[in-house]
Image (spheres, helix red, strand yellow):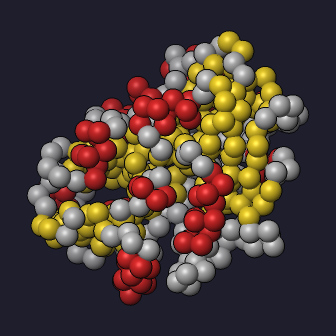
Amino acid sequence: MSHQTSELPIGLAGKQYEISQVSLAVKDANALVPLYYDTFGWGGWKVFDHVPPLHHDTERHGRPTPYTLRGAEVQVGPINFELLQPLSGENVWQEHIDARGEGIASIATMFLTNEEGEAVKKAFRDELGLAVTLVGHIGPHIEYYYLDTEPDFGCLIESGSGHALDFVPATYEYPADGSLLAPSPVSGITYPITQVSLTVRDLEAKIKAYHRAFGWGPWRVYDSADAMSDCQVAGEPADFHIRWAETMVGDMNFELVEPLGGPSPWQEHLDTIGQGLCSISVAIPDAATNDRVREQFAAQGIGVKASGRIGSAADWFVLDTKAAFKCLIKGGTGHGFASDAPHTEVSGG
């Protein structure tokens, strides 16, 4: 886990909130680990069976609720990427799978001490009236908890005193030789995670919520009518309308997308699943390498779901990866934040 830096703004409880983790709810973590490693070169996976006695004192809505799960974590640059497979009991990941299918379930803004975790919990309760919906403990140090953030923030948000990757021994590691983050064994391309995207219904309200809680901002707000061109869906010219906002949270680009009609991956997500985390990005600012990305995925039977241009130079494309990888994955030569696309800038306050 990376640590809070002076580049991050100050949010509730006087804390700095980095995006330390993005988590997927999945049905078979063991099968997905080698797929991600072989495709992206993300190595140093640690797989944990979160079962008693190491996993203990679990609660749901304030009452003791036994549940177990399997977690697989890998560090990809500044972010912990996690697969969570519910095994038994009442829990948020099984609820996500039952209601929405497999997919990105939450982001985390994790700390390193119980004192920090408690301070954040208290601030969200006292300042925002948000209760804790799920609590679990791993070993003697880690308390993790989920806050009731979906109505105001559009997704589940986790916090607490640490990720398993940093504090507890794994059930097993993949690959077995201990290889760490490296270029893809298939293509030789290095894949960073550069962005996490959230589909929302009310862009301005979500900007204000994230700014109030975490201090995140300034935000750059874009309209596809002014900032996008050459858009295609399923290989055909497409006329869709979105508004979106981006901010940098340390080294991570965090994006909110409000679909306003027409065929697009974000409108599809909103119509079929509702608000929620919809994609991660592996943007590579090199057009030739991004052509190789498309070729690599085409060889795996995965095409481009949608594509377009932001401003005069930044290309983007959404790969049709949901079935295989359990989330949409975006590529391209950059995000709006680094483009010359017209936008307005707001603090969020």
Residue 170 pos. (x, y %): 82, 52
Residue 183 pos. (x, y %): 60, 79
* Quarter of the figure with residue 113: top right
User: Is 305 situated left or right of 5 in this image?
Assistant: left
Q: Nearer the viewer, residue 105 or 216?
A: 105
User: Residue reaching furthest bottom?
Assistant: 288
Q: Nearer the viewer, residue 98 or 6?
A: 98
User: Is 186 situated left or right of 171 in this image?
Assistant: left
Q: Nearer the viewer, residue 79 or 322?
A: 322
Q: Classify 186 as above or below 228.
A: below
Looking at the image, which residue is at 69% across and 27% down? 67
Residue 264 pos. (x, y %): 22, 53
Looking at the image, which residue is at 15% across and 45% down? 261
* Quarter of the figure with residue 334: bottom left
Quadrant showing the C terminus: top left
Residue 9 showing in the rendered view: no
User: Is 33 situated left or right of 245 in this image?
Assistant: right
